[in-house]
Amino acid sequence: MAAFAATAGGLLRLRAAGSEGQWRRLRGAGLLRGLLQPESATGVAAQRRRVAHFTFQPDPEPREYGQTQKMNLFQAITSALDNSLAKDPTAVIFGEDVAFGGVFRCTVGLRDKYGKDRVFNTPLCEQGIVGFGIGIAVTGATAIAEIQFADYIFPAFDQIVNEAAKYRYRSGDLFNCGSLTIRAPWGCVGHGALYHSQSPEAFFAHCPGIKVVVPRSPFQAKGLLLSCIEDKNPCIFFEPKILYRAAVEQVPVEPYNVPLSQAEVIQEGSDVTLVAWGTQVHVIREVAAMAQEKLGVSCEVIDLRTILPWDVDTVCKSVIKTGRLLISHEAPLTGGFASEISSTVQEECFLNLEAPISRVCGYDTPFPHIFEPFYIPDKWKCYDALRKMINY
Amino acid sequence: MAVAAAAARVWGSSRGLDRAGLLLLRRPGARGLARSLPRRQEQQHFPSLDDKPQFPGASAEFIDKLEFIQPNVISGIPVYRVMDRQGQIINPSEDPHLPQEKVLKFYRSMTLLNTMDRILYESQRQGRISFYMTNYGEEGTHVGSAAALDNTDLVFGQYREAGVLMYRDYPLELFMAQCYGNVSDLGKGRQMPVHYGCRERHFVTISSPLATQIPQAVGAAYAAKRANANRVVICYFGEGAASEGDAHAGFNFAATLECPIIFFCRNNGYAISTPTSEQYRGDGIAARGPGYGIMSIRVDGNDVFAVYNATKEARRRAVAENQPFLIEAMTYRIGHHSTSDDSSAYRSVDEVNYWDKQDHPISRLRHYLQSRGWWDDEQEKAWRKQSRKKVMEAFEQAERKPKPSPSLLFSDVYQEMPAQLRKQQEALARHLQTYGEHYPLDHFEK
């Protein structure tokens, strides 16, 4: 697990260290700098690595939280963690490789600043990381656990579902682990394949007692992560890894909160409601622009932000207005969280619906490597589904 | 760079890798950036390279003889005891010389637990409670260890440690309330019987999944260390639960993160029907400790003073030195696994009788008390009557109390009730208005 993680992390770092989307060429192989050469000796066009399937759209600079600084997603995470450790002397951060700064650099500088008893490595054992974190939280101290990739959270599933989620309920509120937050990199990254691309939010959505949160941007991430850390319930915070470097915007330096269980209408519209979370929000934003331009259709775009407990009211209010709903996520279609949204919306807004609810999701396969461009619910698939809904 | 240098040394320059090959051998540095030029070879200064292994992972001596290490199951870790099976002190220097009142408290806790077990087991048989687990034969492990701790030391249990709560004066009323799930249950009726918890007495609520408490206890110990609380955490589990991955996780974390924790394994011979011969092949649980770098001991769990001494010393050192201790208390599960089990299906009555009659923690302590003149048959008779009366009174009271309001089905899922859950709560209330006759509402508070 660690070898691949290090490799994947290494790949991302290599990738990121150069310019966006370009492969580091092999030394000693005699290739020219810059982009790869066109046709090779065999006559087959050499394939360049594709650009991302989305364009990150930064939000306008927030004015109400004081001084801001240009930060990417991982720097926004570091900032949130820094704020937390500064404010809360009981707070500790732990997991695999967090001491040197983390495979995605989210914890850079924190061990030097706060000490090795507060930012430390654990052995390679996710069930131990989460169990240990629960125990810290039971004493009332703040535990921020890192799981290196969301794909590796499953050994901790028992501790999360059977223990953390149920701690308060089963003890009659004598004990709880509310001060536990679990962070994990999440979602597709262009080359992650089966075990570095997963979006497992649906598994946890079925578990009353925990909260599940996914940010779309650095500003959202810092505010949502701070809310998770301060929330009195165990929270899982999934960080879209493809945005760690690609998403850059102005983020307040001081702490601030973005509320949990509140979806955000990031663009108002009248004809269709589009719902997504994480990276996919940027995909549907682009789809909304395409729909406006090509079809004259006005889309209302909603970032769900919190998967559990989710903001039913905001989504339903929007569907009552527009009559059409499209939900999109990278995770596989069957049993994906779009199913829950779809089911609830048809219960609450049945008579308002002009068309069946559309789900544009990953296929019911493991996440493939070379086939990623075909697998992901990209803007063309979303656009096509939207078009069919409009013409229903 | 060391790789390339070593390669050059091994192969020599004539057969060596050419420059391009050496360049390909280079690995990216810590920040993922491949070096643009070959680095000048760094000399690492070892005292004498050929004498000692230099591996980061292990640095014991070299050996040039092929020899597998024998797992020592025949003459394994010895069993520490203070009293013989007749309750006589073997080595007077190991006698903890506890005052009479304290030892009498041991005895009363163990016997009261035993009495409560008999009555509640029976009550399940009669359909009054849904389920029960007895502690027969293991009372010594609970009381000996509990007595060696501070009252504020945090306890994580598995499910067969009621004697720890008993020793900490958890009232009979609350034991019964939890088993009956009545309105006095601090757990609000949410869990099956014997899933006790008590914040006041620092006993974390029991959960059914096995061994999950082990890494949690380690985290709690870490937090106690950071808080300079001078507290130890004790974590109980059975030899069966020790097979779970969570146990491995907990041991490893406790050692690497230097946590003040006592791992207390009750090795009672069975995990439901599975005997130890099918649970592990090594020398029990104590032998695993050194593998993790953990101080370990095996004790006679039916000898309450041995348990006490070992726990006391472990506690002192765990807190002083911030390191974990592993105590494997050998004992025997005299009762069935639970009321859902009939152990005659997998073990002989003779075997059970041996432990009940010849090596029982309560009898051994009673012999000790009697030989000291601190107890006699008359006191025994009076106490049996008194303890039974106390239990019966608590029992009858627990029977009569109503169950909590069904609205408590919905609270404490989160600290605050989410909107969707409140809707479900309201939906149930409406449903009961129409269909209430089909539900046992008479037994529940409004």
Image (cartoon, rainbow, N blue to C red):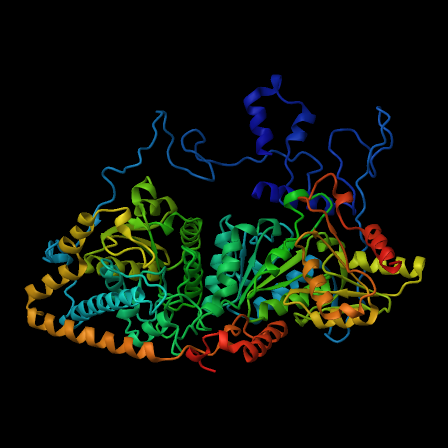
Q: How far from the left and from the top, in percent, is residue A127?
A: 50, 52
Residue B32 in view (yes/no): no
Name the quadrant of the N terminus of chain A: top right
- State the residue lying farthest toward the bottom: B446
**Direction from residue B318 to residue A234 in the image, left or right:** right
Q: Who's the residue at 38% across and 30% down the image?
A: B62
The residue nearer to you, when weighing B358 against A281, is B358
Q: Is residue B255 above or below residue A310?
A: above
- Position of A374 with respect to B150 (left or right) is right
Image quarter where the C terminus of chain A lies is bottom right
Is residue B151 visible in the rendered image? The answer is yes
Q: Is residue B229 left or right of residue A192?
A: left
Where residue A278 appears, as percent x and y from the top left, is: 72, 59
Q: Residue at x 45, y 75 (%)?
A: B440
Quarter of image, res B20 = top right
Q: Position of residue A186 (x, y in %)?
A: 66, 53
Q: Which residue is nearer to you in this view: A281 or B96?
A: A281
Answer left or right for A220 relative to B96. Answer: right
Q: How many marks?
A: 0
Where residue B4 sits, quadrant-wise, is: top right
Q: Picture coordinates of residue A3 (x, y %)?
A: 58, 41
Extreme residue in the top direction: B14
